[in-house]
Amino acid sequence: MPQYNFLVIGSGIAGLSYATKLARHFEEANEAVSIAVITKVQADETNTKYAQGGIAAVWSKEDSFEKHIDDTVDAGDGINKRDIVEIVVTEAPARIQELIDYGTRFDKEADGDYDLAREGGHSDHRILHFKDITGAEIERALLEEVKRHANIRIFTHYFAVDLITQHHLGETVYRYREDIKCFGAYVLNTQTGEVEKFLAKTTMLATGGIGNVYQSTTNPTIATGDGIAMAYRAKGICDNMEFIQFHPTSLYQPGKKPSFLISEAVRGFGGILKNADGNTFMENYDERLSLAPRDIVARAIDSEMKTKGTDHVYLDVRHLDYEKFVEHFPNITKTCLDVGIDVRKDMIPVVPAQHYLCGGVKVDEWGQTNINFLYAAGECACTGLHGANRLASNSLLEAVVFGHRAYLSTVEKLAEAHIPNNVPDWDDSGTTHTEEAVLVTEMTRELNSIMSNYVGIVRTNRRLKRAHDRLDLLYKEHEALYRESKVSVPISELRNMINVSYLIIKMATARRENVGLHYNLDNIKS
Ligand code: FAD
Ligand code: SIN
């Protein structure tokens, strides 16, 4: 069975920036190590690849760390961890310079300075971007950088099923036990159907978001919360799961999954939100108008749609310089045109869609979880940076800063790690290939419906209770099916999405005040 020094689960910005740092460190030290990066489909199919707007950092002389810190805390409704915000904002320029050194291109002005865009909640222009496909450019550059390191091997089409801890050695592992250790993961080779044991001294969870828990999401199909669910089952601590960010402006295309994003940078460029009557409405909600933080804009749109009885609102860019618009947003312009929307003449129909999870596996300032030798970074981690609502373009940034910090900690702690020699192979005795794919599909639909209808932008105690009760039934049905089935990606993803939904509902129910993205009508005091 393979044994590695380092296991990295996920090949987005968090996983790859961590892996490349480790690779370079040991090459420079002339030490031979093995770094396994696993990814459930092809290497670039990640949330990272779809990022549009860009990555935030203080880059111009007019801007300052204080302003970026204040904007982050303001967007997060004040419950961010201030020390983490300061770390991320001040380390941002160095980490972004490394991305540039790996070959990432960001758009420049004619004078050679970076073209800094502005997005909702930012008091200055500070978003580095590559047209409207920044994530694809970063992912490309990171994958190129990986190729330069012979000590990294990427395993595509490998699906991590469960983390390995002392539980698998027959010990009782409870959540607040301080000496839980991670020894790697059981991983399904989706091409052979066999579950392999990936033993490793340290394991990094960089598994991204949870979008597919909801009916409509901007996230690709890989985003099923696997890392968070695996960590939780291994007795990891999760936090802030109630803070689900709905992006205000996904393209209105009923039934299409994932939803195509119309970047917030379009509003930063001058796009204006209008209701079904063609009238502006943001002035009734926030003085920052279309560029208020996302939680405020998404709720305003939700309220506007409910008041007018419509399924969407509009984003109007008809007044903007078309040539400049196309230059900055070629992908958005083309995608609109492909579905018959000519942004010169037509307003773009938009609707909020699930976009980002602000919570996740709780980590310290070095990316360490409560489980020893288990790190988490990127969207699956909860560092405290975002508080109750993430500021636009702070996600790629958080991933790259924490990829770096986790690498430093991994190197420091490595000598303490060891792999026991009695970890059993995956045991699937008594299970069979399920003929019941229809059950998994239907249960996923039910889950999506529960989460979208009862745990969306606006919540109530009654909706949350109903969500909890319905989910409990689904959980029991699924557990029975899971116990008798050979492991497969769909049944495991559903298991993970049920676990993640449970955490969202539990934390949403426990939160008694409205803050940031959590908005419960029953919390409003009359
Ligand atoms: P990802 O990039 O999602 O990578 C997750 C990896 O984990 C994948 O390789 C996947 O295969 C792997 N994985 C998951 N589960 C398993 C498993 N069980 N086994 C094996 N592998 C697994 N943020 C910004 O800051 N700026 C933006 O402009 C921006 N725009 C966005 C636009 C869109 C449409 C979307 C969806 C998101 C956007 N975001 C943006 C958010 C940002 O892109 C993500 O939060 C970030 O890329 C997450 O990176 P990550 O490395 O944590 O995870
Ligand atoms: C966008 O381009 O609007 C997405 C930015 C983000 O999610 O940070």
Image (cartoon, grey):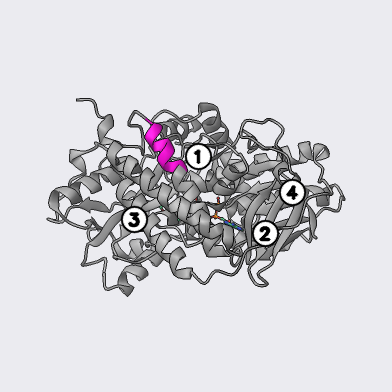
The residue carrying mark 2 is 187
Tell me the distance, in whole angstroms, between the alpha carbons under discs 2 and 4.
22 Å
Q: Name the residue under label 4.
A: 22
Range shown magenta: 503-511
**Relative to 398, is 162 above or below?**
below
Distance between mark 3 and mark 2 Cα atoms: 30 Å
Query: Badge 1 is on which residue?
Result: 58
Question: What is the spatial separation of the Cα atoms under label 4 and label 3, in whole angstroms?
Answer: 42 Å
Q: What residue is rendered at 47% in x and 42% in y?
A: 503
Q: Which numbered disc, 2 or 4, marks the residue that appears first in the sequence?
A: 4
Residue drawn at the location 79% of the way across and 59% of the way down: 2
Residue located beneath label 3 in the image: 449
- Separation (CA) of disc 1 from disc 2: 40 Å
Q: Position of residue 210 (x, y in %)?
A: 47, 52
**Are the two marked residues, 1 and 4, in contact with CB atoms closer than 8 angstroms?**
no
Mark 2 Cβ inside 8 Å of ligand 1: yes
**How many dots with numbers?**
4
Amino acid type for the residue under numbered disc 4: Leu
Question: Does residue 517 show up?
Answer: yes
Residue 460 sits in which quadrant? top left
Closer to the N terminus: mark 1 or mark 2? 1
For the residues carrying marks 1 and 2, which lies nearer the camera in this image?
Answer: 2
